[in-house]
Image (cartoon, grey):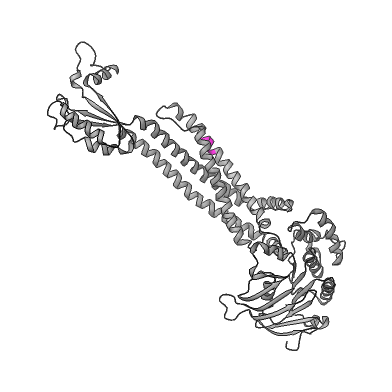
Amino acid sequence: MIRFEKVSKAYPGQARPALNSLSIDIQKGEFVFLVGQSGSGKSTALKLMLREQRPTTGRVYVAGKEINRLAGWKVPRLRRQVGTIFQDFRLLANKTVAENVAFAMQVTGHSNREIRQRVPETLELVGLDGKGDRMPDELSGGEQQRVAVARAFINRPMILIADEPTGNLDPGNTVGIMRLLDRINRSGTTIVMATHDVQMVDQMRKRVIELEHGHLVRDQVQGGYGAQF
Amino acid sequence: MQLRYVFTELRQGLRRNLSMHVAVALTLLVSLTLAGVGLLLREQAQLTEEVWGDELQITFYMCNGANDRNPQCAGAVDDSQKKVITAALKDNRYVDKIEEESQEQAYKRLQALDVEGVSGPDPVVKSSDMWQSYWVTMTDPHHSAEIIEAVAGLDGIDHVGDVHEVTGPILAAVDGLQSAALVGAIVLVIAALLLVANTIRLAAFARRREIGIMRLVGASTLYIALPFLLESLVVALVGIGLSGMALAAVMYFGVEQRLSSTAVTQWVGWEEFFSSFAIVAVLGILLTLVPTLLLTRKYIKV
C-alpha cells in the first residue's frame, strides 16, 4: 500500500538530509506507528506519502502509484484515497460539525443526496451522533479530533495518515481516539500514525517504525516505543 | 462539481474583500477609460488624416515678373523652366496628381471670393499680378518635405504653399493627446495589476485554512481556484461596465453635444466607440484574470 525505496529527502540550506535512504513497505490493512524524536524525519515521511513533497532521490509508492511521476492534476485523485488528521484538528470554526464533515465530500464533487446519507452515518461511527449541529468550539478536544477523523474517513480512504493525533488530548480522550482508529483499521483501512506517545504505542502492540536522523533504526512487528527514549 | 459551494464562497469573498474590490474596480474604471480615450483619439487622428489628407496639397507658385517674393526670379517663368518643374514633379514618387492653374484661373478664383478691389472697372489687383501655379496632390501627406526639397529650388519657382504647415500642428496635438492618454492608461494598468495581485493574496490568506483542507481531501485545483476567478471576473465586469459608461459619457457630452457641430473634421461616432470599448473590455478581463490565474497557481499549489 505504501512503499519507500531508498528514499532521501534534502531541504535546501540544510546540511543534513531529513530522510536518508529510507526503505519501508507497509501492507494493506496494517496499523503502523512512526516514532522518533523531533527532527527524525517523521513529518517528512508523511508529507511524501501525501505528495506534499517529492523525494530528492529514491521512489515512493502510495496506493500503487509512484508519486514522483504523478502528474500534478492527478494528485487530488490520490489524496481522495488518503485521509489525514492532525494534532491541531484543523476544523473550520465557522461551520458546524456536520458541515465540517460534509465539506470533504462537497469539495470532491459528491451529490447532496450522498452527503445527507453519509454524514450522519460517519458521525455515528465516530461517536458524535446528535452533535452535528454543534460548532467546533462547543466541543471538547477529543470530540473535535473525532470530527477531524470523521472528515478524513468520510470519503472512505484506503489509507489514513495521522500526524500526532493525540498530542493535544488528555489520556481519556487519547484512548477514545485510539479505539476509534483501531476500529477504522479493522474495517480494512491502512493507518500510519506518527506519535511521541510512549504509553499508547506500548499498549497497542502494533508495528513500529522508528526513525533517527532520517535513518530507519527499527522496524518491529507488535513493537513498543522502545527503551531508547 | 458542487457549484453551490463555489457561489457561496464567491459571495463571501466579495463581501470580505469589499474595500479592495472597490479599489480594483475604480482603478480599472480610470485605467480602462483612459485606454478607451486613447483608442478613440487614435481613431480620431486616422479620421482627421483621411479627411484632410485628401485636401493636403502643395502649391508651387511660379514667378510672374511683377510681384515676386523670390529675389532669384528674373521675370515671368518660361516654358522651358515649366518643363523642368513638371518633370521633377512627375519623377517624384510621392506625387499623385498635378494640376496647373493659370494666372487667369487664379484671378477668377480670387474674384469668386468677392474680395474688395478685385472686381469693378479699375481693379487694384489684375490677373497679371497673380501667379501661375502647380497644385500637387500627394500619395502620402507625411512626405511633403521631400517634394518641396526637390522642386522649390528650381528656376522659375517663386514660393511654395503647404497646407500641411497649418494642419500639421493640429494632427501633432491629437497624436500628443493620444500618447498622453495611453501612457496614463499604462501606469494605471500597472496599478490595477498590483491591486489585483494584492487582493488575491489577501483572499488566499483569509481562506488559507479552507484551501489547506481542500487540498488534503483531494479537491481539484480548478475547484479551489474557481471562487477566486469568479471574484476577479465580477470585479472586472464592474470596472468594464463603469468605464463603458464613462466612455459613453465622453462620446455623448463631449463629441456629440459639443464637437460634432464644428465642421473642422469628421468626428468619431458610436461605431468607433463600440470597437474601442470591445478592446477595452477584453483588456479589462485579461488584466484581472491573468494575474488571478498566475497567483492562484502560486498560492493554492496542489
Q: Is residue B8 left or right of residue B146?
A: right
The image quarter in which residue B301 lies: bottom right
**Position of the N terminus of chain A by quadrant:** bottom right
In depth, the one of A52 and B256 nearer the eye is: A52
- The answer to if B53 sits in the magenta stretch is no
In depth, the one of A43 and A156 nearer the eye is: A156
Q: Outermost residue, top direction?
A: B121
User: Where does residue B12 sit, x and y in percent of width and height?
Assistant: 69, 52
Above or below, comparing residue A218 to residue B114 in the picture: below
The answer to whether one can see residue B85 in this image is yes
Q: Is residue A133 left or right of residue B27?
A: right
User: Where does residue A51 sit, x and y in percent of width and height?
Assistant: 67, 69
User: Where does residue B248 sit, x and y in percent of width and height?
Assistant: 54, 35
The answer to whether one can see residue B125 in this image is no
| Residue at (57, 81) in percent of width and height | A15
In depth, the one of A190 and B120 nearer the eye is: A190
- How many dots with numbers? 0
| Residue at (23, 32) in percent of width and height | B160
The dominant secondary structure in magenta is helix
Q: Is residue A160 left or right of residue A43?
A: right
The image quarter in which residue B218 lies: bottom right
- The answer to if B249 sits in the magenta stretch is yes
Region in magenta? B246-250
**Position of the C terminus of chain A by quadrant:** bottom right
User: Where does residue A214 sit, x and y in percent of width and height?
Assistant: 65, 81
The image quarter in which residue B200 lies: bottom right
Q: Outermost residue, left direction?
A: B74
